[in-house]
């Protein structure tokens, strides 16, 4: 949550040397507790659970910027789903770190005997480099209540050492689940055959933040023609813009992405889930064509999801199969970075798309559909 409207922040953010806008507070289901000294009746979201019950909670980080760490006092979370993909259910965590756009489902089992409620805590983690921007007005924590409904309940301000849990979750350790530790129920990673490899870099240019780029170019929206119009009406070569990447039907694609930046980036690919074959930790360095052979791939049961993390000064290697024709954006899910061009376009099966629209006489309907959808 920002007290100042986003468009005002963006105007300032476009100037070189301006730091990422830091949120004023966090919210849980739209409710926060910013400066409760001004309002002694701060409210909390209530999530109910019965004694002896196991309940599924669906969690999404809808923030434009902040990574969120979620904890529930004295309760473990059993991970069962990520970005719509079911897991094997064997992973339990005390805290869950979510980058913007990421989704999880967890199972919470109530205690057998309880005469009290428990805090659900969401804590923002702006990048450590910006911690000196914090001041007393920032409220990085939001709380909700896990409410037991079968007893006379007393609200207890339990600490549960939750800050220690959160601090450990920032680093890679057993207390929080890394993406490579997530095991899907079924993986079916495509292997064998010819795999096309693309090397990407993500970085900011100029003074901080400058303008971000992905695939060595800052993404700029076309000024007067949609990508679909270019694809359908003109020669395909006109789509060979610097930010576009062409793949053909049923190709297997590996994206090797290096993060030459001090901040992590949550990357989201439209139209696909990707298999995370390898993911470096903070400061693990970069991968090139020479060092790629030294990287250990997980081809047995890698997690696949549509929003994945690339850590600071490190790399990630993801794979997808080109089985969904379309024009898909790959972009940072940190909206400030996206606004400054951290995106690229993957043009998938362009010949098939053009033939499909021509065969079914759909080209003339495009302007009508555009008007219909404003």
Image (cartoon, rainbow, N blue to C red):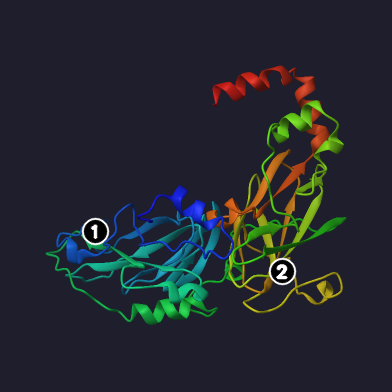
* Total labels drawn: 2
Q: Is residue 303 visible?
A: yes
Q: Position of residue 328 (x, y in %)?
A: 68, 43
In space, the residues marked 2 and 1 are separated at their CA atoms by 42 Å
Q: Reply above or below: 19 against 169.
A: above
Kindly state the secondary structure of the residue where label 1 is placed.
Answer: loop
Disc assigned to residue 10: none
Quadrant of the frame with the N terminus: bottom left
Q: Residues within 10 Å of mark 1 (few under 14, many from 20)?
A: some
**Residue 369 locus on image (x, y percent):** 61, 22
Residue on which disc 1 sits: 44
Image-based side of 24 in relation to 60, left or right: left
Q: Look at 36% across and 61% down and name the residue there.
A: 26
Give the answer, above or below, for where 372 lies relative to 86.
above
Residue 257 falls in image quadrant: bottom right
Query: Does any portion of residue 279 appear in the rendered image?
Result: no
Q: Which residue is mark 2?
A: 298
Give the camera-side residue of 364 and 238: 238
The foreground one among 186 and 144 is 144
Residue 152 position, x and y percent, is: 11, 64
């Amino acid at each position: 949550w920002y007290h100042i409207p986003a468009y005002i922040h963006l105007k300032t953010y476009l100037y070189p040397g301006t730091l990422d806008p830091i949120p004023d507070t966090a919210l849980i289901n739209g409710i926060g507790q910013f400066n409760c000294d001004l309002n002694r009746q701060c409210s909390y979201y209530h999530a109910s659970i019965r004694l002896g019950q196991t309940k599924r909670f669906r969690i999404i980080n809808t923030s434009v910027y902040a990574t969120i760490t979620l904890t529930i006092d004295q309760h473990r979370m059993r991970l069962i789903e990520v970005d719509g993909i079911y897991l094997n259910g064997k992973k339990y965590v005390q805290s869950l770190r979510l980058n913007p756009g990421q989704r999880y489902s967890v199972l919470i089992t109530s205690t057998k005997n309880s005469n009290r409620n428990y805090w659900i805590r969401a804590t923002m983690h702006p990048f450590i480099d910006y911690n000196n921007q914090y001041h007393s007005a920032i409220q990085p924590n939001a709380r909700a209540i896990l409410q037991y409904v079968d007893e006379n309940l007393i609200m207890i301000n339990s600490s549960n050492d939750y800050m220690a849990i959160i601090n450990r979750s920032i680093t890679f350790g057993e207390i929080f689940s890394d993406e490579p530790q997530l095991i899907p129920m079924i993986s079916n990673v495509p292997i064998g055959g010819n795999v096309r490899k693309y090397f990407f870099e993500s970085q900011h240019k100029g003074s901080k933040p400058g303008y971000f780029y992905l695939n060595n170019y800052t993404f700029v929206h076309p000024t007067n023609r949609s990508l679909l119009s270019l694809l359908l009406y003109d020669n395909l070569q006109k789509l060979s813009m610097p930010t576009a990447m062409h793949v053909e039907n049923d190709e297997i694609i590996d994206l090797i992405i290096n993060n030459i930046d001090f901040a992590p980036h949550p990357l989201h690919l439209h139209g696909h889930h990707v298999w995370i074959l390898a993911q470096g930790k903070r400061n693990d360095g970069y991968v090139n064509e020479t060092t790629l052979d030294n990287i250990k791939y997980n081809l047995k049961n890698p997690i696949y999801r549509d929003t994945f993390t690339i850590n600071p000064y490190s790399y990630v290697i993801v794979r997808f199969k080109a089985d969904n024709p379309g024009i898909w954006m790959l972009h940072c899910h940190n909206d400030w970075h996206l606004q400054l061009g951290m995106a690229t376009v993957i043009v998938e099966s362009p010949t098939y798309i053009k033939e499909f629209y021509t065969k079914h006489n759909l080209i003339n309907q495009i302007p009508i559909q555009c008007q219909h959808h404003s």
